[in-house]
Image (spheres, rainbow, N blue to C red):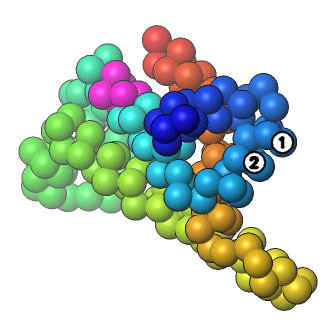
């Protein structure tokens, strides 16, 4: 079984039989990228859908109205010129990649630290990262819910 088909099978197992999925994650730490890639692809699709659906001018005005009168009008005009839907999409995707990387790495590092403090010297960081990455797949359900909310 190649890595891609094994990963695809484990995506389904994450939802139907998590114990098997997490055993797979521990045994195949090199496949940590598969669930992350799936999350990034699904999130990118969501943001593309969001910015294609939402009126850009309304979104910019909505964001700027939260500032109230705290910004001078000339700065407001400059910000409006910079806040295009394309720029906001780029920012959303950049933050997504950076935040996901930091969060998953931080949780994996925490798990490794706790494991080492409790005497587990066998489990490597890559195995923890794989476990954390695979355990994040149920976030896809929330992403589907967000997509419905945009409708």
**In front here: 124 or 114?**
124
In the picture, measured across the screen, residue 68 lies left or right of residue 113, that is left
Q: Which residue does the image show at 39% across and 35% down from the upper left?
A: 41
Where residue 15 sits, quadrant-wise, is: top right
Circle 2: element type: helix
Asked if residue 48 is among those painted magenta in the image, a careful observer would answer yes
User: In this rendering, is residue 82 above or below 145?
Assistant: below
Q: Is residue 46 visible?
A: yes
Q: Which residue does the image show at 63% across and 73% down from the upper left?
A: 125
Q: Which residue does the image show at 47% across and 51% down from the upper left?
A: 33
**In front here: 146 or 70?**
146
Q: Which residues are magenta?
A: 45-50
Q: Position of residue 90 (x, y in %)?
A: 24, 46
Q: How many marks?
A: 2
> Mark 2 — residue?
22
> Mark 1 — residue?
19
Circle 1: element type: helix
User: In this rendering, is residue 101 above or below 110?
Assistant: above
Distance of label 2 from label 1 (alpha carbons): 5 Å
Quarter the N terminus occupies = top right
Q: Is residue 139 visible?
A: no
In the picture, measured across the screen, residue 77 lies left or right of residue 56, that is left
**In front here: 135 or 78?**
135
Categorize mark 1 by other alpha carbons within 10 Å: few (<14), some (14-19), many (20+): few
**In front here: 48 or 32?**
32
Categorize mark 2 by other alpha carbons within 10 Å: few (<14), some (14-19), many (20+): many
Q: Position of residue 79 (x, y in %)?
A: 17, 51
What secondary structure predominates along the stretch shown in magenta? helix
């Amino acid at each position: 079984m190649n890595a891609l088909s094994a990963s695809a099978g484990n995506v389904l197992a994450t939802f139907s039989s998590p114990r098997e999925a997490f055993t797979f994650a521990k045994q195949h730490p090199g496949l940590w990228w598969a669930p992350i890639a799936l999350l990034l692809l699904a999130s990118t699709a969501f943001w593309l859908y969001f910015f294609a659906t939402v009126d850009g001018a309304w979104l910019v005005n909505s964001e700027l109205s939260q500032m109230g009168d705290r910004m001078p009008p000339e700065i407001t005009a400059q910000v409006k010129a910079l806040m295009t839907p394309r720029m906001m999409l780029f920012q959303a995707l950049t933050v997504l990649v950076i935040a996901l990387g930091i969060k998953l790495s931080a949780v994996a590092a925490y798990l490794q630290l706790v494991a080492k403090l409790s005497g587990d010297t066998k489990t490597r960081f890559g195995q923890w990262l794989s476990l954390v990455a695979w355990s994040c797949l149920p976030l896809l359900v929330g992403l589907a819910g967000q997509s419905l909310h945009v409708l």
